[in-house]
Amino acid sequence: MIVIGIISAGFTIHANNTVMTSGFFTKASAQQQSSNYTLYTNSIPTWIRNVTKWWSEGQTSDSDFLNAIQYLIDTGVIHVSKTSSLSSIANQNSTMTQKIDDLQTRYNTLQIKYNDLLKQIQNVPGNQITNSNNYAESISAVAVYPIVQSDGFFQTSVYNGTILKITVDIRDGTGLVLANTAIPEGVDFQNSARIAVQVAHNITGVDLSNKDVIFSITTDNQNLQAVDGGSAGGAMTVLLTSAILGKSINGHVLMTGTIQPDGTIGPIGGVLEKAQAAANYGAKIFLVPTGQGVVDEQHCTQSTQGPFVYQSCSPQEVSLTSIMESKYGMKVIEVGNINDVLKYFNSSE
């Protein structure tokens, strides 16, 4: 019955000098005119079926289609009654023709809307991600590590800052979140990676349940014995979100800060040492959690009373920007949430 519909639709179209490519015509004409024909479907050669299919899809000419129909008529596969000539079909079905024209108009309108919707969907991030193996961007994060100092009697620990390089790979999978490091990693670091995936999903709307996300962390610092803590969580979130969206990362921006499930940037330790490491790395902007753009410095005063010298010291808050910008030209900016962070990392300035 499908072939009947296509054939009868072909007659209707040539009677009205129009072109038919829509399935609406096929269905409507078949319902109106199928009773005018006797068709033995088992007798239809394969090449006839192919020509009919190609013509309905606009892949072959009208003359090829008519030759195929004529072949079926000549070989007796289709028996055409006298009342089913092309002219009589056209004359008897003016109402059906109008309905078909209305359907064509509706179809054209839907086609335009579909194309517009398709363009919009293609711009949605969720449709841009398959596998991000081609995403070549990386992000640098700042960490601190302890150095033990001894004066022969006592041992004290001081902290130095260092740079971590993080890359991400998104593959088809089952929703695993993995951290690939050359040195041991802690539980807090692994938890930060999982939260980073959750927040990236919230920002982009991309379902990562059928993907495996693999963060790889490397460093050139041989003194770093382990990777732990959540201070790289914000950077991992920026990296993954940028990979999904296909956006570049500004290499002049560095950050430190944990990532919370609601997208806020949480506090960290060793901010002064990390700022120093970022400045030595050559960063122009260093992002820190809200409230951590200042450090305490000891300010001491001396007074003399007779043979005695008295010194009094008290901590005072000093802006990290004033320290780092005067020495290195690096700005220290406080950020409260991941959206604020992305504005800096996805900017070319």
Image (tube, rainbow, N blue to C red):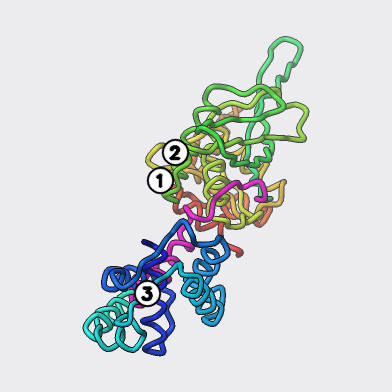
Residue picked out by circle 2: 198
Residue 212, magenta (yes or no): no
Label 2 secondary element: helix
The range drawn in magenta is 108-135
Residue picked out by circle 3: 8
Q: Amino acid at mark 2?
A: Gln
Residue 121, magenta (yes or no): yes
Asked if labels 1 and 2 touch by Cβ distance under 8 angstroms, the answer is yes
Packing grade of label 3 (10 A; few <14, some 14-19, many >=20) is many
In the foreground, 123 or 156: 123
User: In the rendered image, which quarter is residue 36 located in?
Assistant: bottom left
Residue picked out by circle 1: 202
Q: Amino acid at mark 3?
A: Ser
Q: Amino acid at mark 1?
A: Asn
As drawn, is 98 to the left or to the right of 135?
Answer: left
Quadrant (top left, top right, bottom left, bottom right) of the C terminus? bottom right
Q: Earlier in the sequence, mark 3 or mark 1?
A: 3
User: In the rendered image, which quarter is residue 221 located in?
Assistant: top right
- In three-dimensional space, the C-alpha distance between marks 2 and 3, rounded to whole angstroms, equals 56 Å
Dominant SS in magenta: helix
